[in-house]
Amino acid sequence: MDKLTLYLEVVPIPLILGVGFFMGMLYLIMPANIRFYATFLIMPAWLVASRSPDLGPMQAFTKISSGLLFLLIALAAAMRPVPKRQIPGIGWIYMIGGLYLMLCLIGVQNTMDELVIQFQWLMLVAAALATVATLTTIDDIEKLIKVLTWGMILALCIPMSAVVMNPGELFGKLGRFTPWSAEPNLIGIAFLMAAPLLLYAIMTTKSNTYKLFLIAALMGDIGMALVTGSRQVVFSLAAAMGLMCLPLIKRPGLVITGAVLGVLVIPFFWGLNQDAVGRLGSLDTSGRLALWWEYFLLSFKQPLGLLGTSGQNAHYSMAVGAGAHPHNVFFEMLYVGGWPYLIAMLTVIVTGLRSAWRVWKVRYMYGTRNQQFMIHMLVSILIAMYLQGMSNQVIFHPTYAWSFLCVVLTVLFIALEREMPYVEEEYLLQFQDWDEEYEEDLNDYPEALPA
């Protein structure tokens, strides 16, 4: 029995239609601008719930309806009453590649499940492209980041609720943190995404009360990430936070405060589960380097991936070994879509990272100092995303806010780079206006001129 059938047994179709109708009516009566941000407020919690099996019908409903959620985001972005930017042509490779993968998945085991997941990916891409089209100013991006931060705080309430309501099952699988039986590597992605957003909010808010709340949320988030025992989550989190903290070298007070909090908090979470946290110090790759080599060799036998094959597993090659997942987004792309798909997606990724670097270098031309630091933060997250992709395939799977944000940031930085000449022109005009004002002041007060 495939997963789709199982989910439909837990959540009957009439219930799905009823809830969908109610949400649709609520969606339509919202003002267009509020509707756009409201979808981002609920998205992280919705997707975290879909990773938590012990939530029962709630998990089944959120899992099966994640594609609908991205469709709502796409519609909200399209109907937002603001000028839209043109999507860079290279961004459409995500959509074309997604359609190509659907052809590759025809004939694999559990074909219907895999096609549904791939359709959800297409909905995610549509939502991401529509979002980039509507984020035309730095103020729009900043507001979305603030809303997304609150969305992540709501999402963190789900694993925290397991600490309160279901403490006996927190470390049920392999001695690692599994709130509501969520896989530690997968729920850890939520902790990874929340940390840099919370740190940015801490560094830019002026309210001391709000800052204390955010610091508590960040410490709890990092603690939960540690006890997942997931090295790819913790190392990617460290990369994002480390890159974000580079500007703090000039602000030693914040560095010292963070170090003190770390010294106090980390031992506490270490004491909760020493085995899980101690696992982070292991450099054992579990044979993944050998697996990557096997998938590389396999790619020459199947240069088009799974296209035209039948009976294959969509997640690992039975020729390599039962359950031998590549644990690498690039080798998974190579296995499923072959060299054409991998080369196409690498083109987008390399272009996105290059664009992010160029935008980062001229971040001083954008808005306020907080907004300039926001660009630094987003570049740090994007780098961490692709580093994390070296040990996990999440950034190309549709049931994660992390993968949605990855597509948004990649295409957004490509768009921002192409708009840099206009930003530079506007930036230089500011100095021209200042010079003209200075000359007018001198003309008004000629006695101020030097003799």
Image (cartoon, helix red, strand yellow):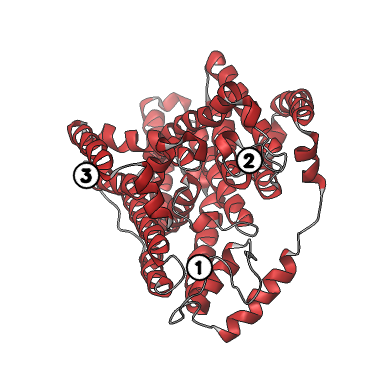
Residue matched to label 3: 79
Q: Answer with mark 2 or mark 1, whichever residue precedes in sequence.
A: 2
Query: Of 402 and 372, which appears nearest the observer?
Result: 402
Label total for image? 3
Query: Of 300 and 139, which appears nearest the observer?
Result: 300
Query: Of 218 and 441, which appears nearest the observer?
Result: 218
Pair 3/1: label in front? 1
Label 1 sits on what residue type? Ala
Which residue is drawn at the image coordinates 65% and 43% (left, top)?
237
Residue matched to label 2: 244
Image: 289 above or below 294 = above
Label 2 sits on what residue type? Met
Report if the CB atoms under discs 2 and 1 are less than 8 Å apart: no
Q: Answer with mark 3 or mark 1, whichever residue precedes in sequence.
A: 3
Q: Answer with mark 3 or mark 2, whichever residue precedes in sequence.
A: 3
Residue matched to label 1: 314
Label 3 sits on what residue type? Met
Q: Where is residue 391 in the image (x, y as percent from the top left)?
A: 65, 57
Asked which secondary structure carries label 1, the reply is loop
* Mark 3 to mark 1 CA distance (whole Å): 36 Å
Query: Of 127 and 371, which appears nearest the observer?
Result: 127
Q: Where is residue 252 in the image (x, y as percent from the top left)?
A: 73, 28
Q: Where is residue 265 in the image (x, y as percent from the top left)?
A: 74, 25
